[in-house]
Amino acid sequence: MEIAVEITSRETIKPSSLTPDHLRHYRLSFLDQISPPVYNPFVLFYTPKKEGGQSNIDDISSKLKASLSCILTHFYPLAGRLKGNVSIECDDAGVPYSEAIVKCQVSEFTENPDPRELRNLVPFVLDASDETTFGVQFNRFDCGGIAIGICMSHKIADALSLLTFINMWAAVCRGEEIVAPPQFPSAELFPPKNILGFEPSTGIIRDNIVSKRFIFKTDKIENLKARYSKEMDLDRNRPPSRIEALSTFIWSRFAWSTRVYSEPSKKCIVLHAVNLRTKFDPPLPQYSFGNFYRVAVTSLQLDSGKECYGLVAKMRETLRGIDKGYVEKLRDGKEHLDFIKRSAEVYLKGQLLAMNFTSLCRFPVYESDFGWGNPTWAGSPALTFQNLVVFMDTKSGDGVETYISLRVEDMAALESDEEFMEFVIPPGKEQISE
């Protein structure tokens, strides 16, 4: 699907009030420093109610810009500029805001979402992160629908911070007051360090990567949970969660279809992103802004057959290790920095195969009502990482949308795997319900 997108205007939105002098220098935290220099993207589709036979898209855009100016006073680092991998100068330079005409119907995106095409609806090239930390692209469709494309630098925020910002922006656009403003404790909790010897861009791949979206319906997920329950002592352990079952299944089919088991000398790991806010004692508020995530690393043995029996229990054990004690060690930083340096070195030598899983399930993806209803659909453009899997709840709640990014030849092998395809609805086979 090739869809024409024409940028019709560009401007800069500045905060509605000046940032106080004592807040103008924002230090990056250690976790910000080691985060990859990419943009976290998100696209929200809406079908505004029509008034007098035609929706007032110009009025909607004006409200968006005015409310964005207001919310930036609370999220002042977004209107500043990155200074190396050290800090943000919160000088109220503003955020880029562009408008575009998309020459098709909204349904041409939402009935068959293509993560690669979604890149045309966001303001920046995702792997070309620069000093600008945030941007918006307002997209108008021929049918009167709209899509708000957003990019936020991963050097300043994780996915939950992005969604928190979007929902607070939506509340301001609806005319509501911000009752619980964001907090910015990251540099205090994880002081910045000299990370010489570690390159945060390790793992970014621009060529030969394809991203596709698959859907696992609830009944199929339950079948997988039942399958992997058989290997667990359910008298002592709860059954596998959705994410545990899906992670195990996707890894096992990937490993089998791409013949990973034929390379026993290669070290294989499965990574799960973990929200650290809940691991503090007491827990940090959800609206704590920054990069508050790390990954649980599960090492795998390549002596299995077609299935990865025992993987659920192994993953659960490593996830359990991301606790208060882990957070305390992470705050010191030295041990973790040494670990990621060693891992990067092994990866660059071609001796490490990693599959990364990130779950946005139960995140507030569909709560962003700017005043014209909740999104008809929300999704993520294709990211530039190899072996990346992102989970999101379907809007209807009857399954899990799964974005998988692989090498082209590995995706072809996975899609040729009969057992994998038996459990998924492949791209183009399901319409998004509005």
Image: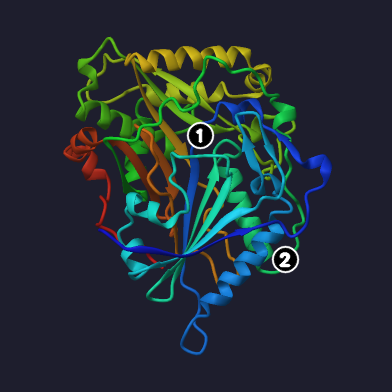
Q: Residue at x 42, y 13 (%)?
A: 345
| Mark 1 lies on residue | 37
Location of the N terminus (image quadrant)? bottom left
Q: Tell me the amino acid under the disc marked 1.
A: Pro
Find residue 134 and report its horizontal and vertical position in percent: 57, 48
Give above or below for 48 relative to 294: below
Which is nearer the eye, 126 or 377?
Answer: 126
Q: Residue at x 67, y 41 (%)?
A: 289
The label shown at residue 176 is: 2
Give above or below for 356 relative to 44: above
- Specify whether residue 233 is in view: no
Find residue 337 and report its horizontal and vertical position in percent: 57, 16
- In the displayed structure image, the side of residue 366 where residue 280 appears, left or right: right
Quadrant for residue 142, please give it: bottom left
Q: Residue at x 79, y 41 (%)?
A: 23
- In the displayed structure image, the side of residue 96 where residue 208 appears, left or right: left
Give above or below for 392 relative to 377: above
User: Going from the N terminus, do you reach mark 2 or mark 1 first?
Assistant: 1
Evaluate if marks 2 and 1 touch, with contact meaning CB atoms under 8 Å apart: no
